[in-house]
Image: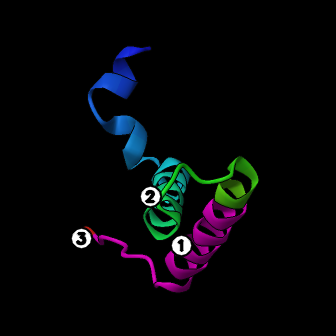
Amino acid sequence: MNEDSLDGSLLDDLFHGCAWSAFLELAVSLGRIPDQEATRRLAYRYYEEALAEKNSRPSTILETG
């Protein structure tokens, strides 16, 4: 295990956060550890939705002047 995974920054990464959310959602709904393939598919769906939402927002540009 590296230092990044110990300080919580791993879950700050968008994809890993989506993967964790998918795993937890499936585990709760199934009442057991979910299938790896089902988790992967749901994680990618969440990731694609999050990217689409992120890219649809206007970016904030700070102007100096």
Label 2: few (<14), some or many (≥20) within 10 Å?
Answer: some
Give the magenta part as a residue range: 41-63
Alpha-carbon span between mark 1 and mark 3: 34 Å
The residue indicated by pointer 3 is 65
Q: Quadrant of residue 46?
A: bottom right
Closer to the camera in the image, 59 or 42: 42
Which secondary structure is most common in the magenta stretch? helix
SS at badge 3? loop
Alpha-carbon span between mark 2 and mark 1: 17 Å
Give residue 24's mark: 2
SS at badge 2? helix
Tell me which residue sits at (46%, 66%) in the image: 25
The residue indicated by pointer 1 is 50
Q: Is residue 62 above or below residue 5?
A: below
Q: Is residue 34 above or below residue 9?
A: below
Q: Quadrant of the C terminus?
A: bottom left
Label 3: few (<14), some or many (≥20) within 10 Å?
Answer: few
Q: Earlier in the sequence, mark 2 or mark 3?
A: 2
Whether 48 is among the magenta residues is: yes
